[in-house]
Image: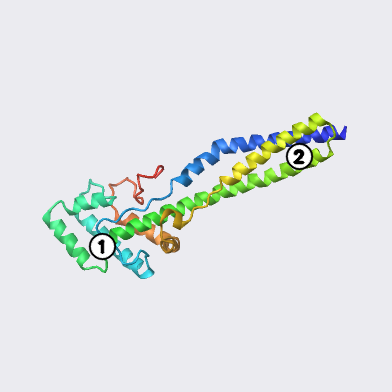
Amino acid sequence: MRSQESGVRGRQSAVSFLSLLIAFLIVSVIPACSKKEEAPKVQKVKKFTPENKVITGEKLEQWLMASKRVGEFIRRFALDDEDVKSKDDFMFLAHSSPRTEAILTSLFNNMELKQGEFWWMLERLDEARRYAELKAQEEIQNNRIDILLAAGREEITDTERVLEKEKEDSRRKELMGRLNIINAKFSELSSLKGNITPEKVGIEPANIEIWNKNKDRIEAAIKKMWKVRPGGKTEIPRDKSIPGH
């Protein structure tokens, strides 16, 4: 009688784990894996080639100061009913007349950073932001997988314990079959854990570090730099080539 009760509990336990695992795979893991594969892409530098691909603390301070000047330029020359929330918008505004183009040239001539370096740094900071967001999502997903794996280990242990005590051949065959299924799903789930690194996506680790240390300051500077109509949203530009941005 105890053997039968243990068998029932083992069967129910295995079924519960498999059901939970299947639901998780359908709802959560597959979308997360898609995000993992959609790693940030390194943007090609067309006009500006830096001597050093790393953004230093000194360079960041120069960029933050330059972003204020760019914001002042935008607010001075943009019309009340037009949005300036991307580099393309900015270039359109700056080249709308010889006067604005001349003032833009003078603006960057009087700053530590030249125009090409300013935009290059903005692109690198945006790459670092997207990597940090992706890494945070990966960590959350990996933690969820770890919880399921821990539950799976318990299910495997319980099923093996029941199998060890079971004497009936048909019942042992059934338990072994379920154990094989659980082990296969366990391995599949383990393989879904992400491990993105800066090297894999072609981003300088130092740039990610400087983003993490100065995130609030950088985000605030970018939001203040752009101009939108009253009631509109001021947000950090997203790369449209990446789904969800």
Residue 93 in the image: above or below residue 63: above
Q: Name the residue rendered at 30%, 59% in the picture.
A: 120
x and y percentages locating residue 40 in the rendered image: 41, 50
Q: Given the image, on which type of amino acid does mark 1 rest? A: Arg
**What is the image's colouring?**
rainbow
Per the rendering, the mark at residue 69 is 1
Q: Report the label total.
A: 2
**Which badge, 2 or 1, comes first in the chain's sequence?**
1
Q: Name the residue rendered at 82%, 40% in the picture.
A: 164
x and y percentages locating residue 199 in the rendered image: 45, 57
Tell whether 83 sits left or right of 169: left
Structural distance between the alpha carbons of marks 2 and 1: 67 Å
Q: Given the image, on which type of amino acid does mark 2 rest? A: Thr
In front: 224, or 178? 178
x and y percentages locating residue 163 in the rendered image: 79, 38
Instruction: Name the outermost residue toward the right.
Output: 1
Per the rendering, the mark at residue 12 is none
x and y percentages locating residue 165 in the rendered image: 84, 39
Q: In what element is the residue under mark 1?
A: helix
Q: Quadrant of the C terminus?
A: top left
Quickly name the residue at label 2.
Answer: 159
